[in-house]
């Protein structure tokens, strides 16, 4: 079993080590945004579930992509 102990550790101000890098900001999409996906190609956002999922029309199919939107990029 693997634990995510790194996420729970806090940085002490007196520590000689650098604090961990902040998490990257979450991607946000809006209706009608043009996007590209590594597998499906170019598309347009049809629906947004705030921070949870987006429905994208790629022309040949409509795909619901869940957060964290790993392979989806806004153009």
Image (spheres, grey):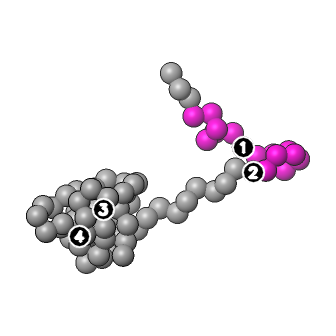
Please provide the residue range marked out in magenta. Answer: 4-18
Residue 49 seen anywhere in this rendered image of the structure:
no
Give the mark nearest the N terminus, 2 or 3.
Answer: 2
Residue 48 location, quadrant: bottom left
Give the mark nearest the N terminus, 2 or 1.
Answer: 1
Between marks 2 and 3 in the image, the one whose residue lies nearer the viewer = 3
- How crowded pointer 1 is (Cα within 10 Å; few <14, some 14-19, many 20+) is rated as few
* Disc 2 target residue: 19
Q: Mark 4 and mark 3 in contact? Answer it, CB < 8 Å.
A: yes
* Disc 4 target residue: 43
Instruction: Kindly report the secondary structure that dominates the magenta region of the rendered protein.
Output: loop
Specify the quadrant that holds the C terminus: bottom left
Q: How many marks?
A: 4
- Horizontal and vertical percent for residue 37? 30, 62
Above or below residue 20? Residue 34 is below
Give the mark nearest the N terminus, 4 or 2.
Answer: 2
SS type, badge 3: strand
- How crowded pointer 3 is (Cα within 10 Å; few <14, some 14-19, many 20+) is rated as some
* Disc 1 target residue: 10
- Residue 26 is marked as none
- Horizontal and vertical percent for residue 74? 37, 71
Residue 65 location, quadrant: bottom left
The residue at the point 47 percent across, 61 percent down is 26
The residue at the point 27 percent across, 56 percent down is 39
- Horizontal and vertical percent for residue 51? 38, 60
């Amino acid at each position: 079993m693997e634990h995510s102990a790194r996420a729970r550790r806090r940085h002490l101000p007196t520590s000689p080590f650098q604090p961990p890098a902040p998490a990257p900001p979450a991607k946000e999409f809006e209706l009608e945004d043009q996007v590209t996906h590594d597998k499906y190609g170019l598309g347009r956002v049809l629906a947004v579930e705030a921070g949870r999922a987006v429905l994208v029309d790629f022309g040949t199919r409509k795909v619901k992509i869940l957060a964290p939107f790993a392979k989806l990029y806004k153009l």
